[in-house]
Image (tube, rainbow, N blue to C red):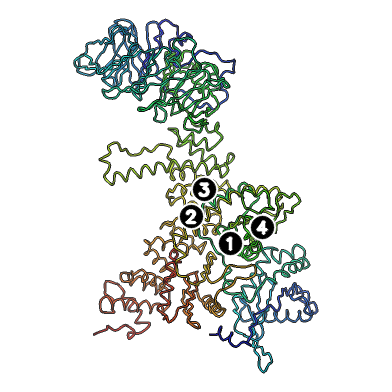
């Protein structure tokens, strides 16, 4: 009963893991002795003294070089030390990203003096490696590849872009609340019947036809994805941006509702509630700026530069990146608003109605509430009843961190083998944690029932599978 | 129409304008329109044509009288009162009937009963003569005088093979002809003052013009020996007539069946409303029960001489002054004023397609070029529903509607579909419209394409539903109690998935000229439309979608479609997915999911798993569904051995030993299971002692 113990002890204080440093370097940029500083493309915190920066970069370089002798294709990914952990990632050839995270600490008081106990084994490699990889993906989404920046304007441009992006982005990393979901970086799909889905398809196709500069469309409802015209990997990171950053930032006016003064300030939106989350704020103001963020997709292949237009209508939102050559004009925005706005309102109410019907039919409300996380590697579908609604900064797990850590451990076990597996763990108090892997799917269930045995736990999980996953091939 | 056919015109020269006088028939009243451009043939896109094989007869001349019978659609050429021969030619039966009859005076009217059984000839105002054409029946003529004293016979019409109606100026007389007795039996008569009459053979309705003005019409309906008087109705005349003389001419009235309903068509030369000057056709819907209702007004927007035809449920109005015709479709949307619907013509006015008369002459001079036929000639006589006769030239045509030219005249594709779907011979035209709107240069927008698909599928669904309810009635045995039940007719307007696939979609996807985005959007739009009308989508359409997506490497799109079950589950689809696994690995998972949902494909699931050497997974699956007692041990052991995993083989082998023990009380395999080589292999690897010992009690 660690939770209780932590509370009772009183003097004990847990200090969450924090970001110590984050840097990006390319060893080829300063190969000669004395020019080591040239290798460093970005270093956080910037205040660190130059020699220390060089020393740290050199150390990482040496570790990677050293481990490469044992495993030429898979050099070291992380380095464990008592006080911290370092994660290495080489997203593009010779470009290395390093993230140093301080281990969580328990602060105890002995004889009135604080004593720090570093918890070396608390952090999960997979979770933080994934966080590091996402840092790169997010950078690439808005800036393109490192290499492209070098081609555009050499080291100088790359450094500027890195500085501009990571300076803000690193502040949004909430390392203390990273967990299994960061490993998956999945997409939550909105369940929908075939007919409504086809209507949406039809709507998107017609909209793309009439607004012919729109190249791809993604359609979301309730922060859940329904359709993506983008490829999976691009959608994955865009989805993360939309749901964890852009949408939450615009949540407040939404919650204010239709009668709020905010609405009243937006004339011209009488028939529908559509508005731009990127781009112009007020379509009736000719002075308004039509600036849309650029994004980069298909970087391995066609390398497309697009404008990200996010248009939202109460609960259904969608983004329409389009070709970047000419930025969309205000006139275009108005056209989009007039075409899409009213139709989207109709569709949204269709979806909502269908959703309520489905909920009634399946009796979803009556079902026993299992706490589970589901992930499918094939389509990145993710479903969690453990996490509360995502906020701008964090996605909060509603269970004890220790249980989350067990989930992470099971996940690490799963990724080591290809076979289907099932792991059942008896956790503290009356908790059981079950992990199942079937083909490319993973399911983690947390049960809390008094005095149950292994067989009963197994039965419970079977019940869950029968109700939640009866239409997929999921081995019992 | 009972009135005697196009006047015998004995005293007129062929082609003389006077021919129209006796025959003006349906050509309409006399107002001359303002001077206007002639023709319209040069404008192209003629959507009306005369049939290619007309009935040719000897042209009317002083010794040859020509008559037309609307009921049998036959032309009678009577030479010298019949003495030198009567030749009867029909539009339907091409073999002419020739006979001679005694010349007993001028023939006023001559008609066969239905089935050419009895010939009726009117030569005087008081009586009609009959002649049997039934083999082995008396061949002598017999006569029937009209019963009403001092009445003059206006004409007669056959309502069946042996029933005839005389229309006199004082009423109607309904007779049964008894050919064996050479006599007639009066079935019923009715006194009423008659100005003129009209007969619609299709519906067996005779319309009588009564009252002084002639605008009160009294319909009678005849069926197997019975005569029913329907409620009379009044035709609204354009303006209150000044004098009390006959104000409604039969030339301005026609009867025709349109969309299965009987209508009286009235050609009103002046609209009642003062603000519009053009003539109009007013449609009165004639019901067997209840009163006749004015339902539609067809705006002609012009004045002059008109004639009406009804072809393929379209009202065709010919205008002699401009030598053009227009068509109306009362099923198309019009302007509804609360009681009547006002229609404008569907297509711009066009002339009937130019027609060449083949020159008949001595064989030696056949090289002579064919002569163009004078269209809209004043010697033309028009009959319902679709007959045009040129008495002076000796031709009878049926009028036809050509659908191909319509495609380029009706640019609104939705309206075009509404129009085409109501036409008899529409299928190939509709399919070509579909193909056309999917390819350059006339590619339609997706919303237009969606509209067209929806219209097609609405019609398709209507048929499926009718078919389904018919099948249900038949299966439940209720059909015996309902003798009227008929299998629904599949018209050409029913364009099903296989038609669309064969003629439109597969061709379109193969052409590859359109961007793939458009191709996929079209396929999805068709599937959306089918779903909207709750029509089960055929597997080959899904296959087409998958093929197209795979060709363009759009696997993620495919994945999403499958995820939302847009492509419905089926074994063939699951197998198709399995075949994609090598180029798109997640197809394996999608396929297995699909097989699982089908719940009838458990054997396939086991096969798929075994083929991937997932022997344990296969065994767990089959055990999960309770089928592990009947599976073949050999199949699993084979797969386990191929997996080259000794522990796996051991596990599987042990499982089946235990099954043998449980089912037969002995762990060893029976010879029928053909597992000898596996037992040998097991012993080789794990030793004989590892074999399970039989449990004895």
Label 1: few (<14), some (14–19) or many (≥20) C-alpha neighbours in 10 Å:
many
Q: Residue furthest right?
A: A34
Is label 3 in contact with label 2 (beta carbons under 8 Å)?
no
Same chain letter for marks 3 and 1: no
Direction from residue B15 to residue A325 in the image, left or right? right
Give a yes or no on whether discs 3 and 2 share a subunit. Answer: no
Q: Earlier in the sequence, mark 4 or mark 2?
A: 2
Of all chains, the one bearing label 2 is A
Image position, residue A90 (x, y; %): 66, 73
State the mark number for residue B400.
none
Q: Nearer the viewer, mark 3 or mark 2?
A: 2
Q: Nearer the viewer, mark 3 or mark 1?
A: 1
Q: Are marks 4 and 2 in contact (CB under 8 Å)?
A: no
Q: Is residue B147 left or right of residue B623?
A: left
Q: Which residue is mark 2?
A: A194
Q: Secondary structure at mark 1?
A: loop
Callout 3 secondary element: helix
Q: Chain of mark 1?
A: A
- Neighbor class of circle 2 (other Cα within 10 Å; few <14, some 14-19, many 20+) is some
Work out how far the residue at label 4 is from the one at label 2, CA to CA, in angstroms. Answer: 29 Å
Identity of the residue furthest to the bottom in this view: A111
Q: Is A235 located above or below residue A46 in the figure?
A: above
* Residue that carries the numbered disc 3 in the rendered image: B525
Reading the image, the residue beneath label 4 is A277
When the figure is inspected, residue B350 is found, relative to residue B476, above or below; the finding is: above
Q: Are marks 4 and 3 in contact (CB under 8 Å)?
A: no
Which residue in the structure is indicated by mark 1? Answer: A223
Residue B375 visible in the snapshot: no
* Distance from the alpha carbon under mark 2 to that under mark 1: 19 Å
Q: Secondary structure at mark 4?
A: loop
How far is the residue under mark 3 from the one under mark 1? 26 Å
């Amino acid at each position: 009963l660690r939770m209780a113990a932590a509370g009772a002890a009183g003097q004990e204080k847990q200090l969450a893991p924090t970001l110590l440093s984050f840097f990006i370097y390319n060893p080829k940029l300063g190969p000669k002795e004395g020019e080591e500083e040239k290798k460093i493309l970005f270093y956080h915190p910037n205040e660190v003294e130059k020699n220390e920066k060089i020393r740290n970069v050199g150390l990482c370089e040496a570790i990677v070089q050293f481990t490469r002798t044992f495993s030429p294709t898979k050099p070291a990914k992380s380095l464990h030390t008592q006080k911290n952990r370092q994660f290495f990632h080489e997203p593009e050839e010779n470009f290395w990203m390093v993230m140093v995270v301080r281990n969580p600490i328990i602060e105890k008081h002995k004889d009135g003096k604080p004593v720090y106990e570093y918890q070396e084994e608390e952090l999960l490699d997979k979770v933080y490696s994934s966080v590091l990889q996402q840092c790169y993906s997010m950078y690439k989404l808005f800036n393109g590849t490192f290499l492209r920046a070098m081609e555009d304007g050499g080291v100088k441009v790359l450094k500027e872009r890195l500085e501009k992006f990571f300076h803000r982005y690193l502040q949004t990393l909430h390392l203390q609340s990273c967990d299994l979901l960061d490993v998956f970086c999945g997409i939550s799909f909105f369940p929908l019947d075939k007919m409504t889905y086809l209507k949406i398809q039809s709507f998107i196709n017609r909209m793309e036809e009439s607004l012919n500069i729109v190249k791809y469309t993604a359609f979301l409802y309730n922060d859940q994805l329904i359709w993506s015209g983008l490829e999976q990997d691009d959608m994955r990171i865009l989805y993360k941006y939309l749901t964890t950053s852009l949408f939450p930032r615009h949540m407040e006016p939404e919650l204010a509702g239709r009668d709020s003064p905010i609405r009243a300030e937006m004339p011209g939106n009488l028939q529908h509630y559509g508005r731009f989350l990127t781009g112009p704020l007020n379509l009736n103001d000719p002075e308004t700026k039509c600036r849309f963020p650029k994004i980069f997709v298909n970087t391995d292949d066609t390398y497309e530069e697009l404008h990200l237009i996010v248009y939202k209508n109460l609960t259904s939102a969608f983004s329409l990146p389009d070709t970047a050559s000419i930025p969309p004009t205000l006139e275009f925005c108005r056209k989009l608003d007039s075409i899409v706005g009213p139709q989207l309102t109709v569709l949204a109410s269709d979806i909502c109605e269908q959703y309520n019907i489905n909920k009634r039919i399946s009796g979803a409300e009556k079902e026993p509430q299992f706490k589970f996380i589901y992930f499918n590697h094939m389509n990145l579908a993710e479903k969690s009843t453990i996490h509360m609604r995502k906020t701008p900064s964090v996605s909060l797990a509603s269970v004890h961190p220790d249980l989350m850590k067990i989930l992470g451990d099971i996940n690490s076990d799963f990724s080591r083998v290809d076979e289907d597996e099932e792991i059942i763990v008896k956790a503290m108090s009356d908790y059981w944690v079950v992990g199942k892997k079937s083909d490319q799917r993973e399911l983690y269930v947390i049960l809390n029932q008094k005095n149950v045995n292994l067989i009963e736990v197994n039965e419970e999980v079977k019940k869950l599978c029968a109700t939640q996953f009866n239409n997929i091939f999921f081995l019992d | 129409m009972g009135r005697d056919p196009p006047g015998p015109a004995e005293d007129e020269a062929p082609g003389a304008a006077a021919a129209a006088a006796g025959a003006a028939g349906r050509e309409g009243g006399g107002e001359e329109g303002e001077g206007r451009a002639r023709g319209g043939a040069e404008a192209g896109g003629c959507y009306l044509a005369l049939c290619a094989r007309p009935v040719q007869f000897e042209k009317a001349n002083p010794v040859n009288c020509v008559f037309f019978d609307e009921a049998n659609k036959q032309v009678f050429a009577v030479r010298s009162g019949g003495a030198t021969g009567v030749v009867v030619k029909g539009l339907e039966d091409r073999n002419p009937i020739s006979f001679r009859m005694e010349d007993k005076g001028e023939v006023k009217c001559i008609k066969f009963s239905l089935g050419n059984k009895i010939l009726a000839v009117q030569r005087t105002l008081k009586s009609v003569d009959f002649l049997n054409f039934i083999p082995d029946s008396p061949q002598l003529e017999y006569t029937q005088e009209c019963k009403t004293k001092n009445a003059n016979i206006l004409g007669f019409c056959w309502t069946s093979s042996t029933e005839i109606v005389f229309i006199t100026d004082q009423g109607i007389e309904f007779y049964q002809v008894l050919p064996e007795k050479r006599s007639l039996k009066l079935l019923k008569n009715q006194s009423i003052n008659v100005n003129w009459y009209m007969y619609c053979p299709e519906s067996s309705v005779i319309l009588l013009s009564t009252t002084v003005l002639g605008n009160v019409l009294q319909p009678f309906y005849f069926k197997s020996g019975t005569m029913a008087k329907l409620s009379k109705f009044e035709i609204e005349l354009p303006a209150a007539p000044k004098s009390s003389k006959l104000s409604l001419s039969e030339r301005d009235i026609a009867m025709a069946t349109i969309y299965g309903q009987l209508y009286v068509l009235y050609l009103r030369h002046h609209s009642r409303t003062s603000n519009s000057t053009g003539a109009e056709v007013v449609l009165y819907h004639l019901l067997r029960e209840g009163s006749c209702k004015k339902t539609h007004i067809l705006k002609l927007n012009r004045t002059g001489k008109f004639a009406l035809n009804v072809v393929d449920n379209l009202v065709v109005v010919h205008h002699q002054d401009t030598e053009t015709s227009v068509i109306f479709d009362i099923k198309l949307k019009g302007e509804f004023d609360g009681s009547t619907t006002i229609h404008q013509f569907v297509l711009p006015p066009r002339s009937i397609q130019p027609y060449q008369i083949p020159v008949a002459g001595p064989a030696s001079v056949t090289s002579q070029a064919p002569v163009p036929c004078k269209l809209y000639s004043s010697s033309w006589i028009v009959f319902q529903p679709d007959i045009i006769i040129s008495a002076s030239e000796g031709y009878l045509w049926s009028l036809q509607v050509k659908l191909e030219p319509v495609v380029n005249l009706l640019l609104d594709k939705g309206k075009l579909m509404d129009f085409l779907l109501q036409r008899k011979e529409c299928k190939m035209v509709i399919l070509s419209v579909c193909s056309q709107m999917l390819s350059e240069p006339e590619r339609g927008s997706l919303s237009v394409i969606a509209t067209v698909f929806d219209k097609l599928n609405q019609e398709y669904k209507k048929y499926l539903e009718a078919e389904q309810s018919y099948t249900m009635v038949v299966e439940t045995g209720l059909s015996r109690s309902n003798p009227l039940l008929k299998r629904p007719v599949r018209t050409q307007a029913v364009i099903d998935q296989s038609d669309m696939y064969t003629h439109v979609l597969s061709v379109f996807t193969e052409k590859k000229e359109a961007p793939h985005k458009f191709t996929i959007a079209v396929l999805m739009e068709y599937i959306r439309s089918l779903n909207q009308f709750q029509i089960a989508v055929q597997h080959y359409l899904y296959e087409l979608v998958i093929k197209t997506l795979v060709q363009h490497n759009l696997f993620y799109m495919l994945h999403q479609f499958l995820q939302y079950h847009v492509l419905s589950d089926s074994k063939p689809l699951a197998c198709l997915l399995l075949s994609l696994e090598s180029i798109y690995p997640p197809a394996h998972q999608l396929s297995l999911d699909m097989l699982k949902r089908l719940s009838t494909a458990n054997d396939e699931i086991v096969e798929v798993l075994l083929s991937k050497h997932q022997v344990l997974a296969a065994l767990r699956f089959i055990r999960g569904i309770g089928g592990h007692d009947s599976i073949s041990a050999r199949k699993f052991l084979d797969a386990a051995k191929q997996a080259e995993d000794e522990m796996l083989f051991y596990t599987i082998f042990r499982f089946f030993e235990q099954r043998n023990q449980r089912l037969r009380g002995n762990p060893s395999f029976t010879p029928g299971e053909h597992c000898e080589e596996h037992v040998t292999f097991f012993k080789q690897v794990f030793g004989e002692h590892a074999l399970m010992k039989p449990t004895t009690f």
